[in-house]
Image (spheres, helix red, strand yellow):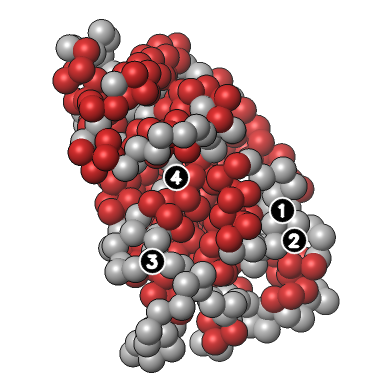
Amino acid sequence: MPLAPYAADPAASRGREFAQEGDGARGPRSVFQRDRDRIIHSIAFRRLAGKTQVFVAPDGDHYRVRLTHSLEVAQIGRVVARQLGLDEDLTEALCLAHDLGHPPFGHSGEEALDAALEPRGGFDHNEHALRVLMRLDSPYYGIPGLNLSWELLEGIAKHNGPVTAPRWALQELDAAFPLDLDRWPSLEAQVSALADDIAYDNHDIDDGYRAGFLQLDDLLTLDFIEAEFRVIERRFPDADEKQLLRELVRSQIGLMVNDLLETTRANLQGIESADDIRAAGRPIAAFSPEMQARERRLKKFMYERLYYHDEQLRTAKRARDVLAQLYAAYDQKPALMPPSWKDSLPPQEPQRARHIADFLAGMTDRYAIEQYRRIFGEVSARLTNV
């Protein structure tokens, strides 16, 4: 299928930060296909299998983690990209990479690292994803990072829109390889951001229900959920509650995807190139006003009933305490870190503090718990909640 005129064209890529011998003569893969493959083969991507999505270090095998969430986002992103004539490989790569900057314990871990680095410029998982891709995960000879395309890096930096106040990590990386932070990103990047919303808005319902934190009757207090559920009940009169809920999640994803496609196609009127996308001054990929309102109500519900559930908040505090104490321990006694991290610890600030945070941010949930036990003994309270 030919690319639409407003799609990112791999043949017109702005290239990579570091030139490599043989660039442009590496077989049949496009620059965006190589980006995707480098991400999939990276250590940072494999670590997502051990990082929190909703539940910290879950005991159950059926709960989503950052890796499975990223795969689900990529599946949705590819469907939308194909329908819009976008570059599927760039869209998929962006979806797979969007969570690589998350530390262990999800947003609780991010809060702990942001507090620890507050005097040193703070910590942001979106900007740290770029730091991972451009500097920390370095498997190739003679270059830092994965050396991905400008379009991939731009999309990670700006998938939520232009960045007007970058923090230190993004400032440093943008100075080395400018990413036009004041402009909107490619349509592929915009689609990846909304694919993320679609995936976690709906799949977190599945996990919250499985964990017993969400009840069907509570979900049905949302009128648009209740209306769709009644349609599903009539369609599957013999299904049990679990099956009906799974059908509800499937239906909600389909409704959101179709709304995104319809609204984005309308917004594309008069858009003739990828440069037009970046110069539009507004997002082109979008939900309709009605779907935006529904999505905001669903998010509010999920925060009240799942993300801010009393047990979740207790677990979040324990997780923040673990990372905060680990940071303090490594700061006071760097010999506690593995030799490769200890031996490369910068003597000066703020580089020293940021190096320790880089080490902590790369940990999986279970590795962080193991390191805490090794240094302090048993974790004071159970860090799993399912």
Q: Residues within 10 Å of mark 4 (few under 14, many from 20)?
A: many
Of callouts 1 and 3, the N-terminal one: 3
* Residue 189, visible in the rendered structure: no
Is residue 370 at all visible to an observer of this figure?
yes
Q: Please, what secondary structure does the residue beneath circle 2 have? A: loop
Q: Where residue 198 is drawn, which disc sits there?
A: none
Q: Is residue 338 left or right of residue 3?
A: left
Q: Are marks 2 and 1 in contact (CB under 8 Å)?
A: yes
Instruction: Estimate how packed mark 1 is, as few (under 14), some (14 to 19) or many (20 or more) residues with alpha carbons within 10 Å.
Output: some
Q: Residue at x 62, y 57 (%)?
A: 174
| Foreground of the two, 135 or 383 | 135
> Residue 235 appears at what percent x and percent y?
44, 49
Q: Amino acid at mark 4?
A: Gly
Task: Please name whichever residue, 229 or 350, is drawn nearer the observer in this view of the structure.
Answer: 350
In the rendered view, tell whether residue 258 sits above or below residue 229: below
The dot on residue 183 is 2
Provide the residue designation for mark 1: 162
Question: Could you tell me residue 302's position as x and y percent?
Answer: 53, 28
The residue drawn where x is 66% and y is 45% is: 166
Can you say whether 76 is above or below 148 in the image?
above
Residue drawn at 28 percent across, 46 percent down: 47
**Mark 3 or 4, nearer chain start:** 4
Farthest-out residue, front: 347
